[in-house]
Image (cartoon, rainbow, N blue to C red):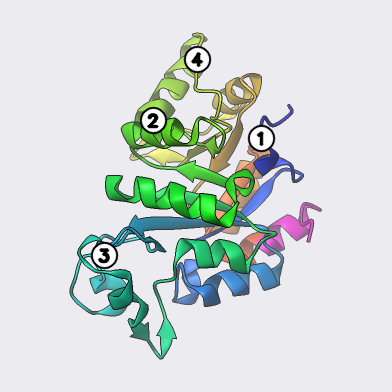
Amino acid sequence: MQPRSGYLDAPAPLAFAHRGGAAHGDENTAAAFARAVDLGYRYVETDVHSTADGVAVVFHDATLRRVTGQPGRVADLRWADLASVRVGGATVVPRLDDVLAAWPDVRFNIDVKADGGIEATVAALGRAGAGDRVLLASFSDSRLARLRALTGGRIATGLGMRGVARLRMASLHGRPLRLPPSVVAAQVPPHYGRIPVVDRRLIAYAHRLGLHVHVWTIDEPAEMHELLDLGVDGIMTDHVGVLRDVYRSRGHWAA
């Protein structure tokens, strides 16, 4: 199987640092990304919201409460307000364009978390000239459709929840499936509730379409080995040291 995007030009299986490796106690920060890159990661998963003044910022939640202990919605605050937010003296809400500029050799898997972040994200990618090293993701199929329209389909994308469901049903019943040309990967959990998602049939079907299958968020070595035995093309983890060790044990660690 040949990937349809330069974003996926590294040897599979890919190793993704989820939010930079959230198990260390911080997430989506410059420190987290630096730690992952120092370990040898070249793929980082992250999340984006937009500020009230249209700046794309790297942050998972809609509000500051869980990460910072402070009140406030990201979408209601200006960049100048967020730039001063600290936890333990460290900045915790970086700008997307700053992150892209800091690691020009790293590929970023960007989950756009809200409709308000669409235009800000596309603008940040344009300023950074980073369109060839990102994949745009979202749970929302309509949000992904808008991202594809704004980027002219020139930036790699994943599938939303409805798209994943269609892919799964097509794999089970052998039905043809047409996808937007920018879709290069199905990024899925191993199961939704008690319903299994990832199995050999799904992987084989996705591969026939030219798609990678990336699975999130996997933190246990036994499950990592099981998924790699099935033939997945990438794993996202919060435990970056654990996944590195599993890949090393199988001869997959390219760093």
Where residue 5 is drawn, which disc sits there?
Answer: 1
Q: Quadrant of residue 211?
A: top right
Disc with the residue nearer the chain's start (3 vs 2): 3
Q: Position of residue 39 (x, y in %)?
A: 69, 70
**Does the magenta-highlighted stretch encompass residue 17?**
no
Q: In this image, 71 relative to 54: left or right?
A: left
Residue at numbered disc 4? 178
- Whether pointer 1 and pointer 2 mark residues with C-beta atoms closer than 8 Å, the reply is no
Depth order, front residue of 90/240: 90
Per the rendered image, the range of residues in magenta is 244-255
Disc with the residue nearer the chain's start (1 vs 3): 1
Which-is-in-front pick, marks 4 and 3? 3
Depth order, front residue of 33/1: 33
Residue at numbered disc 2? 145
Disc with the residue nearer the chain's start (1 vs 2): 1
Residue at numbered disc 3? 74
Numbered disc 4: secondary structure: loop
Numbered disc 1: secondary structure: loop
Q: Position of residue 239 (x, y in %)?
A: 55, 65
Please give the name of the residue rendered at 47% of the width and 15% of the height, measured from the top-left corner: 170
**Quarter containing the N terminus:** top right
Disc with the residue nearer the chain's start (2 vs 4): 2
- Whether pointer 1 and pointer 3 mark residues with C-beta atoms closer than 8 Å, the reply is no
Q: Characterize the local packing of mark 2: few (<14), some (14-19) or many (20 or more) Cα atoms within 10 angstroms.
A: some
Depth order, front residue of 111/209: 111
Please give the name of the residue rendered at 41% of the width and 27% of the height, measured from the top-left corner: 163
